[in-house]
Image (spheres, helix red, strand yellow):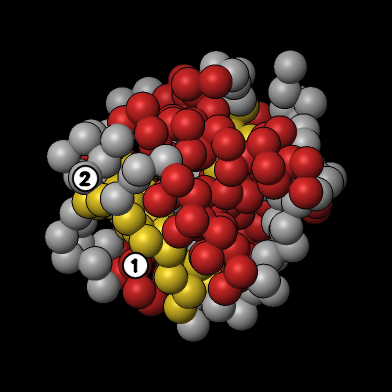
Amino acid sequence: MHKILTQDFENAISDYYYLINKKYPQKAILKLIGDRYQLDKRQRSVLYRGVYNCEENELQNQKKCQLTANDIVYIDFYNVFLTIAHYLTGVPCFISSDSFLRDCGESHGRLPTKEIGTQTFSLLYDYLKVINPKQINFILDRPISFSKKQADEIETELKNRSMEGSAITAKSADYLLKQVKTGKIATADSVIIRNSYVSVVDLAANVLSANYHPDCLNIKKILNHNFPS
């Protein structure tokens, strides 16, 4: 079920969580725990991207919300798109300690195959059409190849589906999203979540749950069991 979850890895998650709450340097902890339990690259990625300290967990979880028909939403396109695409290609996804869905694909802007991309777009558009927010604004990172072309294609698709919205490219989507002061943001980027002025939608998780009901590794559940309140 969870190919990367072993007893050693569960122990590593707990040890890592204990140490980051003691405020030790994150990268040093990652190397220490990773070497101690001989974790592979993906397991180390899960620790780094999926385990936060108590304060971060509370702050990030408190900002989480659902998308409704009355919302204006700003979508961190590549963050959402790639999480869905990675799930479709079999990359492990996990519920992080702050309750947001993330994956250990580490694509660094590399886009999926055309077939997976088309399927991902379809799932995303279909979900948004059902919710039908008041306005949907996609934000794409300009440095990523073909982002302008993708933005144009997204705007065309929104128009074809009679959905209000836009798609723009920005030098830094992260920076732009952190400036949003009305509406909601859709992302699982922890830095954006912590610094956002508005509530945050875990859109990739919602899309996947509506279509596949994925049984993902649940770090939050592991930590709640090993560190009961």
Query: Would you place residue 208 above or below residue 49 in this image?
Result: above
Question: Which residue is disc 2 drawn over?
Answer: 134
Mark 2: few/some/many CA within 10 Å (<14, 14-19, 20+): some
Q: Residue at x 59, y 19 (%)?
A: 212
Q: Image height check: is 92 above or below 35?
A: above
Q: Which quadrant holds the N terminus?
A: top right
Does residue 78 appear left or right of residue 52 in this picture?
right
- First reached walking from the N terminus: tag 2 or tag 1: 2
CB-based contact (under 8 Å), mark 2 and mark 1 = no
Q: How many marks?
A: 2
User: Where on the picture, by quarter, is residue 150?
Assistant: bottom right
- In the rendered view of the protein, which quadrant contains the C terminus? top left
Question: Which callout, 2 or 1, points to the residue nearer the camera?
Answer: 2
Per the model, the C-alpha gap separating discs 2 and 1 is: 18 Å
Graded by Cα atoms within 10 Å as few (under 14), some (14 to 19) or many (20 or more), the crowding at tag 1 reads: many
Q: Position of residue 159 (x, y in %)?
A: 40, 51
Mark 1 secondary-structure assignment: helix
Q: Which mark is residue 167?
A: none
Which residue lies most toward the front here?
A: 160
Depth check: give the residue in front, 63 or 213.
Answer: 213
For numbered disc 2, what is the local secondary structure? loop
Name the residue type under label 1.
Leu
Q: Where does the image place residue 228, in percent across and percent down from the top left?
A: 37, 23
Image spot of residue 63 (x, y percent): 25, 46
For the point 42% across and 25% down, the residue is 224
Between 220 and 132, the one lying in front of the other is 132
In the rendered structure, which amino acid carries the disc numbered 2? Lys
Q: Which residue is mark 1?
A: 177
